[in-house]
Amino acid sequence: MKRLDKTEIIFKIVSYVLLTVFAIICIYPLIYVVAVSLSDIAGYNSNAITFLPLVSDGNGGVRVGIAWGANGKTDSGLVANAYYQIIRQKEFWFAYSNTIFYAFYGTLVSMVVGITGAYALSKPRLMFGRGFNFLLTFTMWFSAGIIATYQNFQTLHIDNKYGFIFGLGFNAFNIILLRNGFKGVPTEIEEAATIDGATEFQLLTKIYIPMSKSSIATVTMFYALSRWNGYYWASILLGKVEDKPLQVYMREQLDGTDSAKAWESTYNFSQDGFMFAMVVCSIIPIIIVYPLMQKYFAAGVNLGGVKE
């Protein structure tokens, strides 16, 4: 085993320290959000929440604990817990279901368009292939602008669930990632399959897709995150309440919260705690799915960056 010299040891120590500090900086906001969402209004007003939730100790002070109550109510009749209030909100879960709908079917449509388009653009034999690739890249450099894009969406009637899925189904950067992934498949394998009589559809489904799992998984996650967190176009295009996703609903709740006095007479948790509880509920699926997909990210993003 090779012994590390002094400079390498110092470099490793500094690297690990910086990475640890960076990780703490990244994860602390989530810890704080969870702590506030589980605290009661006395704990929140104490301005002492750091890592753990705080609740009233009954003597004018606070202690570590979780705001709760029998049947979701305190002894004074106030709603005890932010998560209990969220569970009772039908509108929240309806918006949640809309977000799941947009994330699943929107990602599915985007991947079908992206995979088929990237497969064609990765082929040197594609007629006018260079021109199509230039036009694809050109859209990343220049765009028509927000107003022109909005007018185009309006003309195409992208103001409902299904139109919204197809209207935002294309992303040039993601198609370039898929194209580079497909270019990394050895041409010898395609030639051998072609000699055996494989069609273009069989080449795509039996060779290119299985051999490009990293890039496909990466782009799938990019699309899913974009759909899940989408707010801007959803807030502008989707006029019907029953079509709005979770992010738009949360923003409307933030703008329409009651006054502090009216709030404290009904709830035993803060307005920020209520919003943070909705944030925690909204990120649970991403927290579950992201670690499962993470192993593909580095390989997927770097595909095409190293040439033999």
Image (spheres, rainbow, N blue to C red):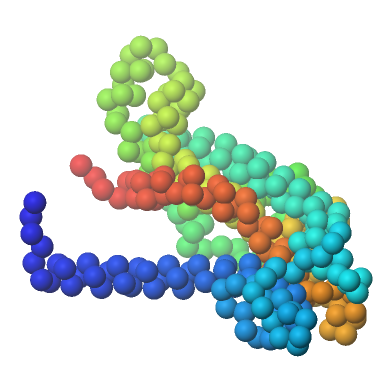
Is 176 left or right of 40, judged from the image as shown? left
Residue 70: horizontal and vertical position, in percent? 84, 62
Q: Position of residue 149 (x, y in %)?
A: 67, 61
Q: Residue at x 57, y 78 (%)?
A: 50
Does residue 214 lie above or below 155 as drawn?
above
In x, y percent, where is residue 163?
A: 75, 47
Residue lying at 8% horizontally and 59% vertically, measured from the top left: 3
Query: In this picture, is 118 found above or below 257?
Result: above
| Residue 143 in the figure: left or right of residue 21 | right
State the residue at coordinates (45%, 71%).
Answer: 24
Q: Residue at horizontal 67%, vertical 41%? A: 105
Residue occupying the far front of the picture: 59
Question: Where, by quadrant of the figure, is residue 60 drawn?
Answer: bottom right
Residue nearer the viewer, 146 or 107: 107
In the image, residue 87 above or below residue 38 = above
Which percent across, then down, holds residue 152?
A: 71, 57
Instruction: Locate the C terminus by quadrant.
Output: top left
Q: Is residue 14 left or right of residue 82?
A: left
Query: Would you identify the image quadrant in which residue 112 lies?
Result: top right
Q: Nearer the viewer, residue 140 or 203?
A: 203
